[in-house]
Image: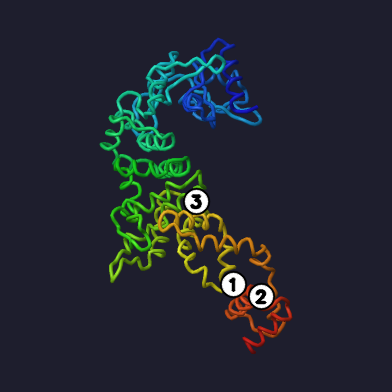
């Protein structure tokens, strides 16, 4: 069954056994906003052992905090016992919890009012102890209770407030945002993996530009991504970038993102990260070596935030290759074909389009590449090799570093359409590399 159907079944069974049970949190918020929930959570007064008894196939994912994962073949639902939390000495998790029978006690320990609503899925009845429905209607992100206390309990909530505001196009309550400004330095005590995950969500869930503007105005950006904050005020040549400085240009790219892949979004954010340290004026504004510096800084940022090796390599490739489109009209056919067959070229091409639309608006090279991609079948971009190292040895050539040069020359001629057979390839080798 679907996760919604499973949640309904779990609630029905808990209630049939004499317990309170409600949908809670993000699923209720999303239903009231008319958004399809991604998952469904259940809150109940049943204790963890009782939940395990009622659902023998469940798993303990946080039983010490009263959280049990109930599964069927296709779906899973988190079922949590009503609780109140004690001190958060690590700024992430409560040191201890007390199980409660009153749902109000459970709501009061949650983060934001819009996430503190409970719903009966059968009747649609809502329990609202914190003004969450009014905040949904007002389109406001507000902490439950004192914002400083909420952010002290879990510092990541500062990033979550910005993510929700960006995603839903909500405002952040003044007292809540003021608390983020006051406590922003605490974000550096949060695990890099948790920061990474929230940043990616801000980039891909919608409203990325607004999210990064709020990160900047709150003080969080300078702590988490000082290399990005350094883009502010870095002028660019108006001939190529009439839109403004590097920060404005980057924001315009983020504004165009429409639920992108994480790697494309990171490429959009970091493609010009090498410009601030390479800025110079010599007759005109220059950024000599900004691509190479950008790759170096990107590697450092993604390493610091604990991205996977594959993600790092993909984003670094976007940064490394994003300027090559300017050379497309004068590329040899072999060079162009090698360019077009780069891994994940669709992301690189989309980054180029975003880059153009955030600056001059000129898409001539983008359109040219699209035409060439349509013109060249896959077998023309990556044809089967006409010769191998074994063929060269068979022809009397000594194995060594020259082999790679010979094979590259053969592939060049093949991609240019100058040779089509192994015999023609070997003739070319004997002419260019006589023994």
Which residue appears at 65% of the width and 27% of the height?
A: 1
User: On the rendered structure, is 137 left or right of 262?
Assistant: left
The tag on residue 417 is 2
Which residue appears at 66% of the width and 30% of the height?
A: 73
The tag on residue 333 is 1
Measured Cα–Cα span from mark 3 to mark 2: 34 Å
The tag on residue 130 is none
Query: In which quadrant is the C terminus drawn?
Result: bottom right
User: 192 or 335: which is nearer to us?
Assistant: 335
Local SS, label 2: loop
Which residue appears at 51% of the width and 63% of the height?
A: 365
Question: Which image quadrant for residue 117?
Answer: top left
Of labels 3 and 2, the one closer to you: 2
- Tell me if I can see residue 382 in this picture: yes
Q: Residue furthest left?
A: 182
Residue 10: x and y in percent read 59, 20
Which residue appears at 71% of the width and 84% of the height?
A: 395
From what the image shows, is residue 192 above or below residue 330? above
From what the image shows, is residue 243 above or below residue 80? below
User: 326 or 228: which is nearer to us?
Assistant: 326
Residue 21: x and y in percent read 52, 16
- Tell me if I can see residue 299 in this picture: no
| For marks 1 and 2 on the same chain, the one whose residue lies earlier in the sequence | 1
Residue for badge 3: 263
Local SS, label 1: helix
Q: Residue furthest top?
A: 18
| For marks 3 and 2 on the same chain, the one whose residue lies earlier in the sequence | 3
Question: Which image quadrant for residue 130?
Answer: top left
User: 29 or 150: which is nearer to us?
Assistant: 29
């Amino acid at each position: 069954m679907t996760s919604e159907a499973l949640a309904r079944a779990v609630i029905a069974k808990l209630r049939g056994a004499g317990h309170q049970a409600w949908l809670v949190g993000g699923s209720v918020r999303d239903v009231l906003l008319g958004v399809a929930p991604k998952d469904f959570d259940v809150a109940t007064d049943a204790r963890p052992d009782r939940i395990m008894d009622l659902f023998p196939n469940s798993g303990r994912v946080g039983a010490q905090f009263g959280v049990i994962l109930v599964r069927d073949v296709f779906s899973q639902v988190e079922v949590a016992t009503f609780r109140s939390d004690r001190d958060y000495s690590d700024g992430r998790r409560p040191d201890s919890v007390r199980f409660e029978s009153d749902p109000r006690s459970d709501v009061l320990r949650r983060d934001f009012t819009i996430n503190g609503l409970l719903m009966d899925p059968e009747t649609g009845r809502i329990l609202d102890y914190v003004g969450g429905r009014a905040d949904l209607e007002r389109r406001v992100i507000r902490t439950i209770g004192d914002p400083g206390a909420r952010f002290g309990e879990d510092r990541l909530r500062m990033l979550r407030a910005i993510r929700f505001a960006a995603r839903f196009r909500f405002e952040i309550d003044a007292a809540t945002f003021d608390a983020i400004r006051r406590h922003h330095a605490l974000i550096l005590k949060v695990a890099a993996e948790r920061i990474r995950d929230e940043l990616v969500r801000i980039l891909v869930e919608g409203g990325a530009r607004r999210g990064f503007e709020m990160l900047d105005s709150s003080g969080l950006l300078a702590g988490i991504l000082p290399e990005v904050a350094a883009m502010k005020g870095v002028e660019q040549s108006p001939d190529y970038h009439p839109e403004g400085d590097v920060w404005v240009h980057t924001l315009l790219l983020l504004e165009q993102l429409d639920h992108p892949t994480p790697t494309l979004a990171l490429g959009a954010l970091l493609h010009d990260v090498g410009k601030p340290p390479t800025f110079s004026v010599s007759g005109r504004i220059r950024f000599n070596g900004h691509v190479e510096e950008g790759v170096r800084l990107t590697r450092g940022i993604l390493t610091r935030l604990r991205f996977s090796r594959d993600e790092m390599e993909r984003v670094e490739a976007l940064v490394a290759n994003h300027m090559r489109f300017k050379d497309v009209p004068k590329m040899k056919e072999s060079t162009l074909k090698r360019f077009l067959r780069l891994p994940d070229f669709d992301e690189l091409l989309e980054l180029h389009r975003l880059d153009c639309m955030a600056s001059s608006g000129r898409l001539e090279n983008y359109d040219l590449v699209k035409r060439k991609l349509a013109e060249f079948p896959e077998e023309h971009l990556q044809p089967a090799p006409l010769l191998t190292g074994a063929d060269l040895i068979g022809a009397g050539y000594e194995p060594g570093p020259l082999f790679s040069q010979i094979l590259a020359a053969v592939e060049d001629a093949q991609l240019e359409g100058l040779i089509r057979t192994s015999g023609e390839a070997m003739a070319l080798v004997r002419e260019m590399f006589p023994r």
